[in-house]
């Protein structure tokens, strides 16, 4: 039986001081939702850890973060800055960072990206966003259903795991789509697969870029000097980076397959175009002498051959056909000689 987290009434996002939600975790790792209209007391007097999620668009939320004196100023700057690039900063035993996540759209699935900003301290995970995020929504749902979480570090790892799950599912779906296109190409339906394979390749590039940046951030944390970060933080970063690397390899493989399939489709289309141009060129060359003959016999000048002959029309036809045949034989022989040299 699923046990829901013990929770006080959830506050309306618009009635809080810029805080979307906040959970205080008890000794069993269950999250207790903060009461409506209340702000958390940090650091916690009983030594419990908190998850506070702030709306960075709301000035009240930014002001609340600024008032937390125990958080280093450098970490606050990372959380409150408007910069768009991913980063991770280590300030004493506090970790602050920014990485991309997928937007949460309740109407439909989306792959649009937004930024998740966080501050990780010993007994606090402070996250902030300007748009709703999928990994935050999934992690909050897990907390609401009673999933035990032992520390703020485990909570951050769970959030990144949710994002990794979404990307892994997208990578698997993308791999199946590429398999389908590959089957069509092997069956001879190359041109019809050109448009979807291009979209698949663009999607793979976006996923690959997202994973590369995220993996790089946690690799940096993993390789941080032991004096700057606790061992458990570096170990967790290593686990996250290792999982992201396995997904990255899958996405990279799918991206390479999509590129090769797109090249194969382009090559087949080019070969088909060349065949059509060859046939058109041969027809043009074969009918060129006949066109010349008819042009000559069509001139309204005196002295034209066969002008007074009852069989003149047929003689002109024979000359045109013979000229076309001679050109065709000559072109065929030249192409065979050229093919033999190659």
Image (cartoon, rainbow, N blue to C red):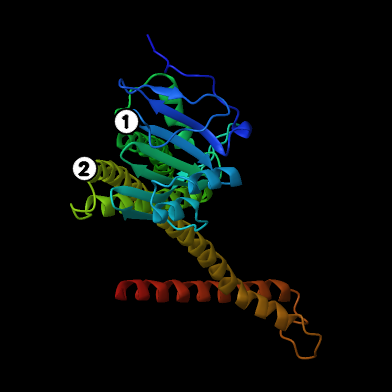
Instruction: Quote the CA–CA distance across marks 1 and 2.
Output: 23 Å
Crowd around label 2: few <14 · some 14–19 · many ≥20 (10 Å): some
Q: Which residue is mark 1?
A: 47
Q: Residue at x 20, y 55 (%)?
A: 225
Crowd around label 1: few <14 · some 14–19 · many ≥20 (10 Å): few
Q: Nearer the viewer, residue 39 or 12?
A: 39
Residue 58 visible, this angle: no
- Dot 1 falls on a residue whose secondary structure is loop
As drawn, 196 above or below 173: below
Q: Residue 4: x, y in percent?
A: 42, 15
Q: Residue 321: x, y in percent?
A: 60, 71
Residue 339 visible, this angle: yes
Q: Residue at x 78, y 82 (%)?
A: 308
- Dot 2 falls on a residue whose secondary structure is helix
Q: Residue furthest top?
A: 1
The part of the image, by quadrant, that contains residue 172 is top left
Q: Residue at x 39, y 34 (%)?
A: 162
Q: Which residue is mark 2?
A: 235
The part of the image, by quadrant, that contains residue 187 is top left
As drawn, 21 above or below 103: above
Mark 1 touches mark 2? (CB < 8 Å): no
Q: Residue 166: x, y in percent?
A: 41, 36
The disc at residue 126 is none
Quadrant in the picture for the C terminus: bottom left
């Amino acid at each position: 039986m699923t046990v829901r987290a013990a929770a006080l009434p959830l506050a309306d996002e618009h009635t809080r001081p810029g805080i979307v939600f906040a959970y205080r975790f008890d000794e069993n790792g269950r999250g207790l939702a903060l009461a409506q209209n209340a702000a958390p007391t940090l650091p916690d007097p009983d030594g419990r850890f908190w998850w506070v999620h702030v709306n960075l668009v709301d000035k009240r939320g930014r002001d609340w973060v600024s008032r937390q004196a125990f958080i280093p100023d450098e970490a606050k700057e990372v959380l409150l800055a408007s910069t768009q690039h991913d980063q991770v900063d280590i300030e004493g035993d506090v970790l602050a960072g920014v990485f991309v996540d997928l937007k949460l759209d309740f109407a439909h699935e989306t792959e649009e990206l937004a930024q998740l900003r966080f501050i990780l301290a010993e007994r606090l995970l402070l996250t902030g966003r300007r748009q709703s995020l999928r990994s935050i929504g999934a992690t909050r749902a897990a907390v609401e259903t009673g999933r035990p979480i032992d520390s703020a570090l485990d909570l951050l790892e769970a959030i990144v795991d949710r994002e990794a799950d979404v990307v892994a599912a997208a990578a698997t779906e993308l791999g199946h789509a590429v398999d389908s296109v590959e089957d069509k190409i092997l069956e001879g339906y190359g041109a019809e697969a050109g448009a979807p394979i291009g979209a698949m390749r663009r999607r793979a590039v976006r996923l690959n870029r997202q994973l590369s940046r995220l993996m790089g951030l946690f690799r940096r944390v993993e390789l941080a000097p032991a004096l700057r970060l606790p061992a458990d933080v570096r170990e967790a970063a290593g686990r996250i980076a290792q999982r992201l690397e396995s997904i990255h390899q899958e996405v990279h493989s799918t991206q390479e397959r999509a590129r090769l399939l797109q090249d194969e489709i382009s090559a087949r289309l080019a070969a088909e175009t060349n065949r059509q141009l060859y046939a058109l060129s041969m027809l043009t060359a074969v009918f060129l002498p006949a066109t010349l003959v008819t042009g000559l016999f069509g001139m309204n000048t005196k002295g034209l051959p066969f002008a007074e002959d009852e069989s003149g029309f047929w003689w002109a036809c024979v000359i045109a056909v013979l000229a076309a045949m001679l050109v065709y034989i000559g072109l065929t022989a030249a192409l065979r000689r050229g093919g033999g040299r190659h």
